[in-house]
Amino acid sequence: MEVKGSRKIAAPQPQVFQALLNPEVLKNSIPGCEKAELVDFPDGQQLKLVVTSPIPGFKGPYRIFMRTREVVPPSHVILIAEPKSSAGEVTATCTIDLVTEGGVTVLNYNADATLSGKVSHIPDIALKPAIKGSLDQFFKNFEKQVAMITA
């Protein structure tokens, strides 16, 4: 499953980039996120999230570990999450590119997720609206968080 799009955020590009990697900003931006903290692993730090799901029958809470790859401040980062639960597994990779355009930062994202187990049987007709609603809420919250940082 692929989800891509772009959003304009009224803040300088370096601020938006830093916010994308800030556990507190993410905790306050991700719908259903109860906790976000950096955790040390032998191969580096990962962001541990505790999240409940908006998808009926898959509420959680779920522990999700997210790591970064190809970090190029302040313009590019790849986020990788591989949550596992009794409901199945998801391998999600999201490439984010930031550009300054006319005084705002344009955040372009391209996410690809592979689902297995029970979660893979959720019909797209139920899954896509839940993902779209969660993304819309994330960006609404994220823009508020970024505005608070730059204020």
Image (cartoon, rainbow, N blue to C red):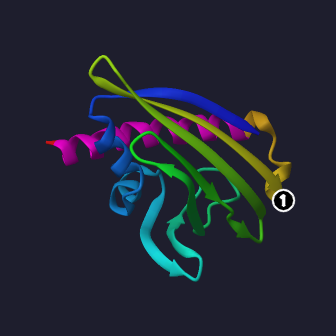
- Where is residue 137 shown, x and y percent of the image? 45, 40
Q: Give the magenta-colored segment's residue range.
A: 127-150
Q: Residue furthest top?
A: 102
Amino acid identity at mark 1: Lys
Which residue in the protein does label 1 denote? 118
Q: Residues within 10 Å of mark 1 (few under 14, many from 20)?
A: few
Question: In what quadrant of the picture does the C terminus appear?
Answer: top left
- Find out whether residue 72 is within the magenta segment: no
In the foreground, 52 or 67? 67
Classify residue 59 by image quadrant: bottom right
The total of numbered circles placed on residues is 1
Q: Main secondary structure of the magenta part?
A: helix
- Where is residue 91 shown, x and y percent of the image? 73, 56
- Where is residue 112 shown, x and y percent of the image? 71, 42
Q: For the point 63% across and 56% down, which residue is it?
A: 80
Q: For the point 26% across and 21% down, which residue is it?
A: 103
Question: In what quadrant of the picture does the N terminus appear?
Answer: top right
Q: For the point 46% across and 52% down, which residue is it?
A: 30
From what the image shows, is residue 63 above or below residue 145? below
Q: Residue furthest bottom?
A: 42
Classify residue 150 by image quadrant: top left
Q: In the image, 122: left or right of 146?
A: right
SS for dot 1? helix
